[in-house]
Image (cartoon, helix red, strand yellow):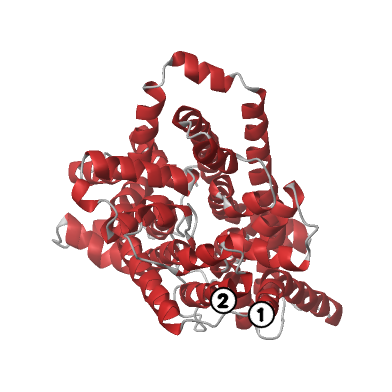
Amino acid sequence: MPSAPTPKAPRLLFWGAAAAAAIAAIPLVYLAIRITGSGIDSILEVLSRGRTWETAGTSLGLALTVIIASLAISYPTALILTRVQVPFPRSFFTLAVLPLAIPSYVAAYAWLAQFPAMSGFWAAALILTLVSFPYTFLPIIVSLRTSDHSLEQVARSLGRTPITAFLATSFRQSTPAAAAGSLLIGLYVLSDFGVVALFRVDTFTRVIYSTYRASFDKTSAAVLAGILVLLAIILISLERKARGRTLRYRPDRGVANSLSRLTSTRGIRSASVTWLTGLATTSLLIPTASLFILMSEGTRALDWGELTTAVVNTVVVSFVGAVIAVGLALPIAALTSRFRNRKSAAIESLSYSGLALPGVVIGLSLVFLSINVFPAIYQSFFLLAFAYAVLFLPKSLGASRSAFESTPPVLEQVARSLGEKPMSAWMFTTGRLSLTGVAAGGLLVMLTSMKELPATLMLRPTGFETLATELWNRTELAAYGAAVPYALALIAVAAIPAFLLSKAILVTKSEEKRPTEISISA
């Protein structure tokens, strides 16, 4: 159903969203200063290099490969967990979400330890797919659970087969969610450093890092980062086109939304269990088992005091970063979910910039800002938490926007007609119904912040160590056995918000309650 003409956004909401987007765009300001200050000749020299466009092709090709592979995993897994009678469906659902807790560089290191011959583009694509497919799996399964299944029944009554009925109804309804999750994966792959560095794949993140470290050529690195932003804009445009201007909520909540499972044969159930077990084995069991094997080979005694301090620092700074990210995301999500126009689209696009850039670029931009504008916050706890918020704002924004879009605006209009002011009307209707989705976005930011490495290395206060930095410090010294406890602790700590995220998304057992639509899309 096409949406109604877009009304004009309240001035306070618009300027609040614009201010939040401007804060998120700080790294772009830094890039603009670096690029414009280098001169046109230097820019053209970088753009004329054949390696620049070869790197662009590799980066975009890797992102598209991981997106396609993730969708190929996510749709069958979501269909099995919503349509097939498998044993322990909630346990399998949680196992499908937990790969979010494994940092990509830890997964790559664990696989390399057992399969040293792994290298190159396809090895990187495999690992990135295994750690990022939940970004598409979660919104897809939520869409399949909350879509109107009566449409499939109508299609079946008109002579459609089960597959064609699904493709014509539920699949089409899930494409916006799948596209949004795909965008998040694409941005994640474009900004990933650890996997491509370990497998020696020349994407923009690896080339930018090498340029800074080897020659400290800020001009070349800035221009390459600018191209990376352009690639991200292309992905954002494709996602917005796939999302379209359709309504995401169901106006008629009176229609039963039964999640009755299809009758399945023993063969289908066996194949489904085999698929789910194989997915859990490759994404969780192999990397964690590899880490335990490496730990058994270590000789250095574990310092429990250092480990405990790193755990506390990781949880606290990630939590503060998540709170800041949610605060920035709320006005942008409220604007873009209700008022779709060119201005709101521009604000939304600016908000995605952080996730498309490597952590080293974000770190350099905030170092530049703090030294030249706010020297008091240089190498402070707040600056590190703020970096996490800028980096992972799109994850909170996507969850909040999706939750707001799933709530009919007529509820706010009814509250206004009863005498409520605009803000209180929003809080009692959309705000209350969307609380789970907003919280899920905050959990996702916290989860991802725990794993962030480059920005943490650059911005952390002196003596402030997280699990990621402790792991990196030991890996640099080739103390791989001593690094494993920190890797396992990082996975265990990150598994907590991942588990809570999976619990938030699970549909309640009572079909009398309205399932809350949650998307972790960007």
- Density class for disc 2 (Cα within 10 Å; few <14, some 14-19, many ≥20) is some
Comes first in the chain, label 2 or label 1: 1
Which residue is more in the foreground, 487 or 214? 214
Q: Residue at x 48, y 76 (%)?
A: 493
- Left or right, residue 304 beside residue 67: left
Which residue is more in the foreground, 353 or 254? 353
- List the residue tagged with mark 1: 292
Q: Residue at x 69, y 79 (%)?
A: 297
Q: Is residue 385 above or below residue 344?
A: below
Q: Secondary structure at mark 1?
A: helix
- Left or right, residue 263 beside residue 340: right
Question: In the image, residue 76 lies at what x, y percent?
Answer: 72, 64
Q: Residue at x 22, y 41 (%)?
A: 15
Query: In which image quadrant can residue 195 be found?
Result: bottom right
Question: In the image, residue 209 lies at what x, y percent?
Answer: 53, 42
Question: In the image, residue 7 lies at what x, y percent?
Answer: 29, 40
Alpha carbons under labels 2 and 1: distance apart: 8 Å
- Marks 2,1: beta carbons within 8 A: yes
- List the residue tagged with mark 2: 488
Looking at the picture, which amino acid does disc 1 mark?
Phe
Mark identifier at residue 489: none
Looking at the picture, which amino acid does disc 2 mark?
Leu
- Left or right, residue 321 beside residue 375: right
- Density class for disc 1 (Cα within 10 Å; few <14, some 14-19, many ≥20) is some
Which residue is more in the foreground, 418 or 208? 208
Query: In which image quadrant can residue 170 be found?
Result: bottom right
Q: Is residue 487 above or below residue 227?
A: below
Q: Secondary structure at mark 2?
A: helix
Residue 486 in sight in this render = yes
